[in-house]
Amino acid sequence: MPAARARIALKRVYEEPTDADGIRVLIDRLWPRGLTKDQADVDAWLPDLAPSNELRKWFHAHSQQRGEFRKRYLGELKADSAAKACQQLQELLNRRARVTLVFASKNAEYNNATVLREFIRGKSLRRKKPRTARPRSVRGSRK
């Protein structure tokens, strides 16, 4: 899902919406507590891009295991069940130069939005090149 043209921002849904947000896309499975639709001011809600209820609950209980959460969530994003929501997000990214992924998590530094942005940008899809072994110099081979 390349998104080279669109700038992707992240923002808590509880923060004040601004014009600079561009298209605001809520990417949580559950509607944020205490917010009306007018207060959230989202243009789209894509709950199928959020982690499954099971993964969401697991990460809440194991918040220090970020690597494992990332691995499991990327697996869910690559599954057929997320394909339609990925396509909808791609269409939004193609329409606007700025898209803001909004989320409810209190942890603004690491959450499903940070992993999703990485996925959108393609970083998680690229495979690292295998390291090639460099020949070791043989001691005494130079004369």
Image (cartoon, rainbow, N blue to C red):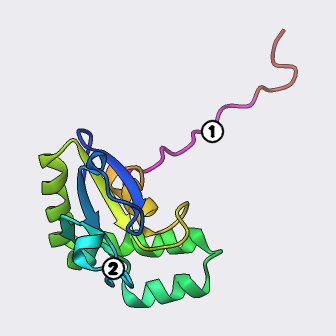
Q: Which element is circle 2 on?
A: loop
Q: Kindly identify which residue carries mark 1.
A: 133
In the image, residue 58 sits, relative to residue 74, either above or below, namely: below
Count of number-bearing discs: 2
Amino acid type at mark 2: Leu
- State the residue in front, 23 or 129: 23
State which region is magenta.
125-136
Amino acid type at mark 1: Ala
Image coordinates of residue 20 in percent, x first then y, are: 30, 45
Q: Residue at x 31, y 83 (%)?
A: 31
Q: State the quadrant of the N terminus.
A: bottom left
Which mark is on residue 43? none
Answer whether residue 40 is visible to the viewer in this image.
yes
Which mark is on residue 35? 2
Image coordinates of residue 121 in percent, x first then y, are: 34, 49
Left or right position of 71 against 75: right
Left or right position of 8 against 137: left
Q: Residue at x 14, y 64 (%)?
A: 88
Q: Residues within 10 Å of mark 2 (few under 14, many from 20)?
A: few
Q: Residue at x 60, y 87 (%)?
A: 61
- State the residue in front, 94 or 127: 94
Image coordinates of residue 140 in percent, x first then y, are: 87, 20
> Residue 90's quadrant in the figure?
bottom left
Image coordinates of residue 134 in percent, x first then y, are: 65, 33
Q: Main secondary structure of the magenta part?
A: loop
Q: Residues within 10 Å of mark 1 (few under 14, many from 20)?
A: few
Q: Which element is circle 1 on?
A: loop
